[in-house]
Image: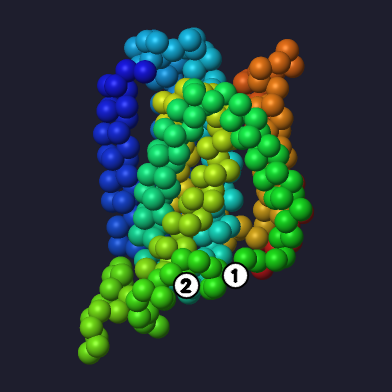
Amino acid sequence: MSLLSYEGFAVLTIFMLALDLYQTRGGKITIKKAALWSVFWVMLALAFNVVIYLYWPLMAPESSYTNSEAATAFLTGYLLEKSLSVDNLFVFALIFSQFAVPEAIRPRVLMLGVVGALILRAIMIAVGAELLTQFHWILYLFAAFLLYTGYKLWREDEEEQEDFSQSLPVRMVKKCFRVSDEYRDHKFFVKDNKGWIATPLLIVIAVIALTDVMFALDSIPAIFAVTKEPFLVMTANVFALLGLRSLYFVLEGMLTRFCYLRPALAFILSFIGIKMLLMETSYAIPTPVSLGVIVLSISTAIIGSLWKTRELKVS
C-alpha cells in the first residue's frame, strides 16, 4: 500500500472531522439539518468508492485486488460498519438519558466519542492486520467470536436496558475525583472552594470510551471477513463513523421504532462469522453475495420495524 494513500486519507479525515465539528457549532441540531448532512456523508462515501474504482492501482500498486474487487470490498465493508454503528446510537441514547446530558453539549460529546472510536479502531486494525499476517489461525478465533456475539445479540432482551451508573468507568472516575452534580457547559473540571472537581461530563466521556472499545471488538473482526486490505478496512470504518453524529440526531426520536434492527445485526454478525470460517474452502462466500445479504437484511429490518411500529408515529 502506498504511504501516500494513508497520508492523504489522514489529511482528508482531519478535514472531514473539522467540517463535521463546524456544521454542528452552536449545539442546536435540527432534524432537517442532520438529515441533509447524513445524506452528504453517505454521498461522500460513495464518491470515495468511485475514486477507489478508478484509481485503485495507484492507491495500492502491490494489491492483488482489481479495481472492481477493491470497490466492492470497500462498499461491503462500509455498509457492514454503517449497519453495526447504528447499534451505537441505541447506547448513546441510553447514556444520554441515564446521565441526563443536556442537549446543548450532546454534539460535542458525540464528536469526542467518534474521535475516540477512530483512534481505537486505527490501532485495532493495525494490530489485527499484523496478527492475521503472522498467525493465520486467528481468523478462526475472529469467526468464533462473531458467531458468539451474534448469538448473544440474538438472545438479548431489548426490554432489559443496561445500567451504566455502576459501570467500571463511573467507579474509576468517582474513585479518582470528586464529582459535581451539575454539568458546566463543555468543561470536564471546575474549581470550587475545596479545589478542582470533575463534572458529570467526564463520567459520560469515560463511559462512551468504554463502549467504543466494546463496539470495536465486534466491528473490526467482522470487516476482516470482507477484506484483509488494511487501507480498505480503515477507510470503510472512517466513513461509517463520520456520519454517525448526524444520523443520531435524525433517528433520536425514532430509535424505539427499530424493533427488528438488533435481530438483523445478530444475523449479519453470524453470517459474517460463517463467511470467515469458509474463506479458505471451496464454499467461500463471494464479497458481492455478502454485500447483497447485508443490504437485504438491513432493508428488511428497517421496513419491517417501521411497519410494525407505524402506530407509534403519532405518539
Residue farthest bottom in this picture: 193
Q: Residue at x 41, y 26 (%)?
A: 231
Question: Where in the figure is residue 209, as x and y percent of width and height?
Answer: 44, 56
Mark 1 or mark 2, earlier in chain: 1
Tag 2: amino acid: Arg
- State the residue in front, 248 or 116: 116
User: Label 2: how many residues lie within 10 Å, few (<14), some (14-19) or many (20+)?
Assistant: few
Q: Residue at x 65, y 60 (%)?
A: 256
- Judged from the image, the secondary structure of the residue bearing numbered disc 2 is helix
* Residue 234: assigned label: none
Tag 1: amino acid: Asp
Asked if 153 appears above or below 200 in the picture, the reply is: above
- State the residue in front, 168 or 271: 168
Residue 246 seen in this snapshot: no
* Residue 163: assigned label: 1
- Judged from the image, the secondary structure of the residue bearing numbered disc 1 is loop
User: Quarter of the image holding residue 103?
Assistant: bottom left
Distance between the alpha carbons at the discs numbered 1 and 2:
13 Å
User: Quarter of the image holding residue 161?
Assistant: bottom right
* Residue 171: assigned label: 2
User: Label 1: how many residues lie within 10 Å, few (<14), some (14-19) or many (20+)?
Assistant: few
Asked if 45 appears above or below 105 in the picture, the reply is: above
Q: Residue at x 61, y 35 (%)?
A: 142
